[in-house]
Image: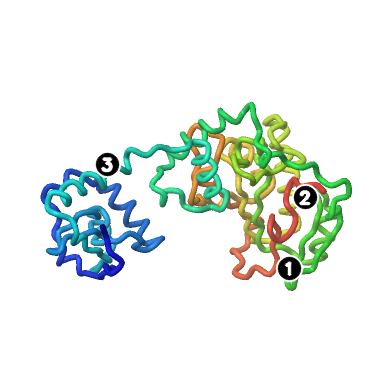
């Protein structure tokens, strides 16, 4: 039994000797996962060693430490174990953890909670494919039964924000308005031309099953373009809102338009009708994959358009978009 007098000791990796009879193998992929965990959470689990510095438990952690360039690791001596007990413990340390199971419902909730806050779930050791499987299976089980925590309350009878509300936030202005309305653009901008647009319009896909997960974080459907529009109707919707955005831009302005892969065709058609030139397409590499597709998308497509023909502007004094102005397609 470990006594209270035993203490964790920092030792150089070069002074430690792997146990020749260690039957547990570690793939390069697992070592990289352990290394990423150490970098994010720290070396939280000391390496167990004999008095002679032979590793009893922690071979993978030592290999991961080498991978990220550590020269020393925390160790704990198991001086009380006999040679036979050390040999048995090497096996037990690896095998006992494998004998544990998972509460699939709790596991799904915990993984979804990490996704909701954009935490890199791969640091848990679960791959994106494994996460997909856990969440999909949990979704099938919960399809007929909604947990109390997931019940979305009814919106208040009197909303706090109303159409036409304009807030002044230092150098920024925030308007509760409709991007289909030229009047709302004028209320927000006055006579000030826009140099840059960054907008994330509704994707014409349902929020439920594509954005909302299994935990307490739920999202309402958009007022429009939430999966109910035909291809032609959605193209017209995008053309109307983006054309208005382009009309308040100065010559040479740039517009960044986010879109889901399902409707990039409609956006390209609307963009060609609204802007002067397609400059490029960016891909936002996200931490975690989203919901609702055969391959869980771990990216966002951002199409880049230009207004006018003059060289690109270098200063951006005014911008419209979901965080600093009018959101195309939103309605109070």
Residue 185, picture quadrant: bottom right
Residue at image location 52% in from the left, 45% down from the top: 110
Image mark for residue 179: 2
Query: Residue at label 1?
Result: 172
Specify whether residue 276 is in view.
yes
Residue 222, picture quadrant: top right
Residue 113 vs residue 85: left or right?
Answer: right
Mark 2 against mark 3, which lies toward the viewer? Answer: 3
Give the position of the N terminus as an image quadrant: bottom left
Between residues 127 and 232, which one lies in front from this camera angle? 127
Q: Is residue 318 above or below residue 64?
A: below
First in sequence, mark 1 or 2: give its number. 1
Residue 140 vs residue 94: left or right?
Answer: right
Residue at image location 18% in from the left, 56% down from the top: 81
Image mark for residue 229: none
Between residues 307 and 256, which one lies in front from this camera angle? 256
| Circle 1 SS class | strand
Residue 74, picture quadrant: bottom left
Image mark for residue 95: 3
């Amino acid at each position: 039994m470990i006594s209270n007098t035993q203490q964790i000791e920092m030792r150089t990796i070069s002074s430690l000797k792997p146990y020749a009879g260690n039957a547990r193998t570690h793939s390069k992929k697992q070592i990289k996962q352990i290394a990423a965990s150490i970098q994010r959470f720290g070396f939280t689990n000391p390496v167990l060693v004999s008095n002679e510095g032979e590793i009893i438990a922690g071979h993978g952690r030592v290999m991961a430490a080498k991978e990220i360039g550590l020269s020393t690791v925390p160790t704990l001596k198991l001086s009380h174990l006999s040679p036979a007990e050390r040999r048995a413990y090497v096996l037990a340390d690896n095998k006992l953890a494998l004998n544990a199971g998972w509460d699939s419902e709790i596991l799904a909730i915990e993984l979804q909670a990490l996704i909701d806050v954009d935490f890199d779930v791969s640091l848990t050791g679960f791959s994106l494919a494994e996460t997909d499987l856990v969440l999909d299976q949990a979704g099938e089980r919960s399809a007929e039964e909604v947990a109390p925590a997931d019940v979305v309350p009814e919106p208040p009878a009197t909303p706090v924000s109303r159409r036409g509300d304009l807030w002044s936030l230092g150098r920024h202005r925030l308007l509760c308005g409709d991007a289909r309305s030229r009047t709302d653009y004028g209320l927000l901008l006055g006579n000030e031309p826009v140099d840059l647009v960054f907008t994330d319009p509704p994707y014409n896909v349902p929020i439920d099953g594509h954005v909302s997960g299994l935990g307490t974080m739920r999202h309402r459907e958009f007022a429009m373009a939430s999966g109910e529009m035909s291809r032609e109707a959605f193209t017209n919707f995008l053309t109307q809102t983006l054309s208005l955005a382009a009309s308040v831009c100065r010559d040479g302005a740039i517009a960044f338009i986010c879109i889901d892969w399902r409707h990039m065709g409609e956006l390209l058609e609307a963009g060609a009708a609204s802007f002067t030139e397609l400059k490029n397409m960016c891909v936002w590499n996200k931490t975690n994959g989203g919901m609702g597709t055969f391959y869980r998308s771990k990216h966002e497509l951002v199409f880049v358009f230009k207004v006018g023909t003059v060289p690109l502007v270098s200063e951006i004094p005014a911008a419209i978009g979901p965080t600093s102005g009018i959101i195309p397609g939103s309605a109070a």
